[in-house]
Image (cartoon, grey):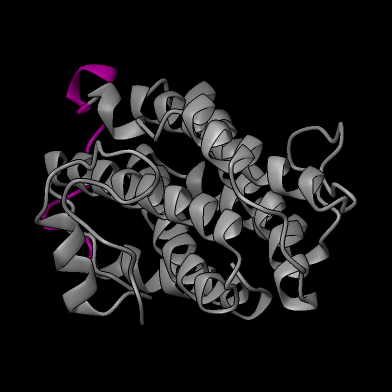
Amino acid sequence: MKAVSLTLVLSAFVALSAIGCDQADRSLSANDMVSDASFGQDADFASMQDELAKLALEPLSPEEAAGLVYMREEEKLARDVYTAMYTKWNLRPFTNIARSEQQHMDAVLSLVTRYELTDPVGSAGPGVFTDAVLAKLYTDLMAKASTSASDALTVGATIEEVDIVDLQKHLKETDNADITLVYDNLMRGSRNHLRAFVKNLRVQGVTYAPQYLTEAEYKAIITTDVERGGNGRGKNMGRGRR
């Protein structure tokens, strides 16, 4: 998520909350949720590391370096929010997807280390970010997601949608094969996560309306099956472009 898009997430969420419910909000329980673990499934991290090891180290542009540092913290934001929401609402999709976000963090860290960049995360605890915009966004999203379980699921869908858009942008900014490999994997995971949150919202009678993806892009994701292919390419979807 670039800073400009992050500042728009909350206003989009407010509008989405106002129009997204087909019926009155009702209490959610763990039994109501679609908790298929495959929604949190990403390509095998060890296999991806093997693929990375085969790729030559290429020159890194300032845009590529900035993108890696930012994506490292962006994935941490998703993990931190989902971990906290599982604790608060006890809904399994949050813990499944939080584990996946940790894999995303590890994947980006492998590139941060590979290119000898300074890791912005280090040993930072939940909600602690080097980037001030991300720090504020975490606080704001946590407040919104703590209102109700359905609001928390909507926040999750919004995070994943913006994540996809940002990864599309970062992919356009790189021609390095190793960065492309990792970003493709992250994109695939984010599409699966978006499917999970939207499906769980539908169980509760809540219709999610896309705020950042085009309607065509959103439908192409939601109407296709969970992607289980390796190395970010997936069984059903190729790399997205805006």
x and y, in percent, of residue 197 in the image: 29, 44
Displayed quadrant of residue 123: top right
Q: Nearer the viewer, residue 109 or 140?
A: 109
Q: Nearer the viewer, residue 104 or 200?
A: 104
Question: Most prominent secondary structure in the magenta stretch?
Answer: loop
x and y, in percent, of residue 124 in the image: 85, 36
Compared to 134, does 3 lie above or below? below
Q: Is residue 44 toward the left or the right of residue 55 in the image?
A: left
Which residue occupies 36% across, 82% down?
A: 242
64 drawn magenta: no
Q: Nearer the viewer, residue 181 or 123?
A: 181
Q: Is residue 76 toward the left or the right of residue 211 in the image?
A: right
Which residue occupies 66% across, 60% down?
A: 137
Compared to 242, does 168 lie above or below? above
Which residue occupies 28% across, 19% down?
A: 30
Identify the magenta region.
20-34
Q: Is residue 197 visible?
A: yes
Q: Is residue 151 visible?
A: no
Q: Is residue 67 toward the left or the right of residue 119 in the image?
A: left
Compared to 233, does 62 lie above or below? below
* Quadrant (top left/top right/bottom left/bottom right) for the N terminus: bottom right
Q: Is residue 65 toward the left or the right of residue 97 in the image?
A: right
x and y, in percent, of residue 226 in the image: 19, 41
Displayed quadrant of residue 133: bottom right
Q: Nearer the viewer, residue 196 or 230?
A: 230
